[in-house]
Amino acid sequence: MTVSIIDVAHAAGVSASTVSRALRGRPGVSDQVREQITAVAASLGYTASRSASSLASGRTFTIGVVVPYVGRWFFSTVLDAAEQVFSKAGYDVLLYNLGSPEARKRFFTKLPLRKRVDAVLSLLIPEEEEVTALRSLGVPLTSIVGGPLPGFTVVGIDDRAGAESAVRHLVNLGHRRIGMISGSSGPLHWTTPVDRRQAYLDVLADSGIEHDPALEVDGDYTVKGGERAMTRLLAASRPPTAVFAQSDEMAMGALRALRRHRLRAPDDVSVIGFDDHELADVLGLTTIAQPVAGQGAEAAELLLRQLSEPEAEPPGQVRMPIHLVLRETTAPPNPRRPQ
Amino acid sequence: MTVSIIDVAHAAGVSASTVSRALRGRPGVSDQVREQITAVAASLGYTASRSASSLASGRTFTIGVVVPYVGRWFFSTVLDAAEQVFSKAGYDVLLYNLGSPEARKRFFTKLPLRKRVDAVLSLLIPEEEEVTALRSLGVPLTSIVGGPLPGFTVVGIDDRAGAESAVRHLVNLGHRRIGMISGSSGPLHWTTPVDRRQAYLDVLADSGIEHDPALEVDGDYTVKGGERAMTRLLAASRPPTAVFAQSDEMAMGALRALRRHRLRAPDDVSVIGFDDHELADVLGLTTIAQPVAGQGAEAAELLLRQLSEPEAEPPGQVRMPIHLVLRETTAPPNPRRPQ
DNA sequence: CTGTTAGCGCCTTCAT
DNA sequence: ATGAAGGCGCTAACAG
């Protein structure tokens, strides 16, 4: 039924080994024969069975990509970029979407990618035992987001610096009551919320502004959470005149809450986000831009390099640049409103 | 190095075939032996090599998912839902992201999923030759979006009905000059833009409104395109008082254009979208909601059913329900503005 | 119920 | 530069 390497060999009048060598560009085949074999293979529509070649060679030419939520903009954007790099290099992508706790547990106990992948790209921050499980695969590991992780190449941004410029921007505009909508903590290695919070505290202290715990609210990294958080901030005895949201999606929720309260940004409250979400521009949201697709592509390339040069010491951590994008949701505090 | 089925067999004092049978839940193994083997396998951390078992059995337990742009909300949402269904059933997902024309051509000529998948879920509308290529795989095929396709199970919505209720909503509000931001045509089987346009024309005719070609502009299914389209509509000699955008992302672009022109929805122009994008709520966008994740899950389940019941005739087409979601961007035409 | 015997399709020595 | 033989790890028939 389906055409095998032997069919090609017969049709070309050579042995299977020669076909194998020829098609994979290995030395030991005369140019003429190689050309002929290539032509025959094409005309027969031959493709080597991945199962068979993996079994024989030990290489799978596929990369496992582990994602917490494919549906979220950040992750799908990273995945998109990474997949392009992998497929261009001839690698397939096995996707594992670990949104629910059950899916996640199932994945790490059964570890379906054992013997199935040449490398793993993780877009989630693994817990302690998950790290161990991944390491046991014995393949190169790269991760996006999060702090340094022994045995992993981590691609990310400087969260501290990003959050600093966000808060400093608000301070420079003249704000003194600055709220923060933060992300929930999560796993141990998930340093992002911690770093961004520390930067917030540092800039406040540096500017001689007293920190008011009432102005810090959790927004769960979601639009809905951001909306709830802003609602709580507005209900404070002395509401903030500006808010730093640790993600654009939470910032969008905050804008939504403002609209619901017949308030506007930046007239009543300034809002700055973090990420430069594809729709931040549509909403006119001022934010800290990070290269999302860029991180996916970079991580993928680093992984491929480890595959092609197994001897070379892989980088432990790579930082991508960030920058402030000024749009329309931040302005100096409104003098007509009470501070 | 890695533990094989023979290691387990030795450790358990049985043969490899018995281990194979026991672990896969096949009949012909006493409960006692099965239990013991399961325990031994677990303690050794054994997982069957997918390559080897696929090669021997012909089954791969993996599904190929083909996507035009993983980065776009609609597709990543469908993918998210489908992946969950597949992985719960013990299937892995091989992802192919075919954004660029080169990637797409490469995919359909090399057809890397030959002999690698048990079924294919396509989120793109295949061209004529692409349909042939997919059929040649000899596995069940399901597709999301698009018209009926022989040999495929197609899951989708009633585009006609959806667009009809959108336009009718505008008419009912009293609008007579109704613009449309449409999606570009694309491949032959891509009936969505055609259907939605036809519904637009039908409702206009049905309401005794003359169709003005100047009020129809292409928005390319993107935010930017929607913005450009709305800008053109506003420049018309007699601009529309309401606009139907064939997707929420184009509608968001339209809202952006309005803001840039110091206009507002619905005060100056009403805007209705299509999809119920996750951020439609944030923007207060009135729209036609379609079950996006629902379609992904449904398609995945139909595929699994075909796998478990190969005899049964698969459904040719499945329609999911849609409904109008009233929010804040539509209202009766403003009497203070000239029609 | 369990073990034995052949492959699945390819890659990799080792000869020639 | 090429061919022959063996094996990758597992499953599926066939015996017992």
Image (spheres, coloured by chain):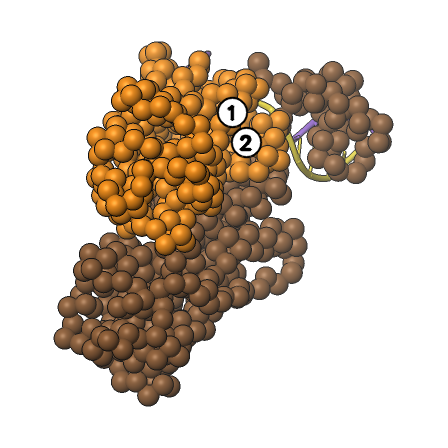
Chain colours: A brown, B orange, C yellow, D purple
Q: Residue at x 42, y 63 (%)?
A: A327
Task: Classify mark 1: residues with Cα within 10 Å, few (<14), some (14-19) or many (20+).
Answer: few
Alpha carbon distance from label 2 to label 1:
33 Å
Residue lying furthest bottom: A208
Please, is residue A308 above or below residue B292 in the view? below
Considering the image in quadrants, where does the N terminus of chain A appear?
Answer: top right
Pointer 1 residue: B187
Q: x and y percent of residue D6 in the render?
A: 65, 31
Front-most of residues A67 and B143 = B143
Left or right: residue A122 versus residue A71 is right
Pointer 2 residue: A51
Q: x and y percent of residue A325 in the render?
A: 46, 64
Task: Say what amino acid the circle numbered 2 marks.
Answer: Ser
Task: Classify mark 2: residues with Cα within 10 Å, few (<14), some (14-19) or many (20+).
Answer: many
Label 1's element?
A: loop
Q: Which residue is drawn at 70% across and 18% down?
A: A43
Q: x and y percent of residue A253 in the render?
A: 27, 57
User: Which picture quadrant has residue B285?
Assistant: top left
Instruction: Identify the subunit bearing mark 2.
Output: A
